[in-house]
Image (tube, rainbow, N blue to C red):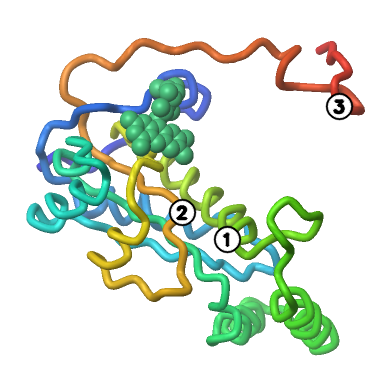
Amino acid sequence: MAKVAGEKPFSEVIKDRRATNNFEEVPIHAADLEKIIRAGLEAPSGYNLQPWRFIVVREREQKKKLRQAAFGQPKVEEASAVVVACGDPKGWKDGDLEEMIRLAQEHGMNDDNLFNTIRQNVTNFLGGNPGKPGGTEPTWDLWVNRHVMIAFTTIMWMAEALGYDTAPMEGFMENQVKQLLHIPERVRVVAMLAIGRRKGPDKPYGGRFDTSRTIFAEEWGKKIEF
Ligand SMILES: Cc1cc2nc3c(=O)[nH]c(=O)nc-3n(C[C@H](O)[C@H](O)[C@H](O)COP(=O)(O)O)c2cc1C
């Protein structure tokens, strides 16, 4: 088992990260794994509703089955841990909203008027009808995706900062993953993250688009000057 890792500077982490294709089959240190996953829980979310749920798959047999649900990608079985990132669009109704308020009170926030406004806003927004795909209001899929991916990415950066390698994945059959991991029907599986030690050298950097294609100033399409 690897020893507990120190942390790399963040800009180095960003520069060095690659999506890893093959991992050494070594266990991850439990203290590192806990630090990595807990980092994700510190992500921001609308009204602090934290609609993410993570299933950490470490057991060999379970990883093997998960690999089958991920088009046979070897990294799912080889990685030390695979984090299956899910989003619950209705968790707010099942206690998350009241738990968020209880936690806020525990942390010294005592504005009952604000809490009642939040209760009303959340119920109006998330208790209403979702937007239609392609419309201007968010669908519940978009809403959970928006939140889960921030937490997911935070987990990825923390793993990389501790010197682990990671592979984000969308290549899986959601229904098969849900069946295998006993995920409730209303919950969406947003992405999976394999974490471990890469086998062999990193794949080459694929480059990124020129800023003229991806960053605009003041309005869509207007060139930015730094
Ligand atoms: C949300 C997401 C899903 C991805 N899904 C897969 C996948 O299922 N299988 C795979 O081999 N790579 C997957 N990738 C990795 C991308 O191919 C990779 O990030 C991209 O080519 C850029 O390479 P780099 O991350 O090494 O810079 C995924 C990346 C992201 C962000």
Residue at mark 3: 220
- State the separation of the CA atoms marked 3 and 2: 28 Å
Observer able to see residue 8:
no
In which image quadrant can residue 181 be found? bottom left
Percent across and percent down for residue 81 are 23, 48
Q: Amino acid at mark 1?
A: Val
Secondary-structure class at tag 2: strand
Residue at mark 2: 190
Marks 2 and 1: in contact by CB < 8 Å?
A: yes
* Residue toward you, 101 or 49: 49
Residue at mark 1: 144
- State the separation of the CA atoms marked 1 and 2: 8 Å
Secondary-structure class at tag 1: helix
- State the separation of the CA atoms marked 3 and 1: 26 Å
Percent across and percent down for residue 215 are 75, 22
* Residue toward you, 179 or 101: 179
Name the outermost residue toward the right.
218
Marks 2 and 3: in contact by CB < 8 Å?
A: no
Question: Which of the image's four quarters has the C terminus?
Answer: top right
Callout 3: 10 Å neighbours few (<14), some, many (20+)? few
Question: Which of the image's four quarters has the N terminus?
Answer: top left
Q: From what the image shows, is residue 13 above or below residue 113?
A: above
Q: Amino acid at mark 2?
A: Val
Which residue is pictured at 49% across the width and 64% down the height? Answer: 87
Q: Amino acid at mark 3?
A: Trp
Judge from the rendering whether residue 172 lies leftward or rightward of residue 128; answer left or right: left
Callout 1: 10 Å neighbours few (<14), some, many (20+)? many
Percent across and percent down for residue 66 are 21, 53
Looking at marks 3 and 1 on the same chain, the residue that comes earlier in the sequence is marked by 1
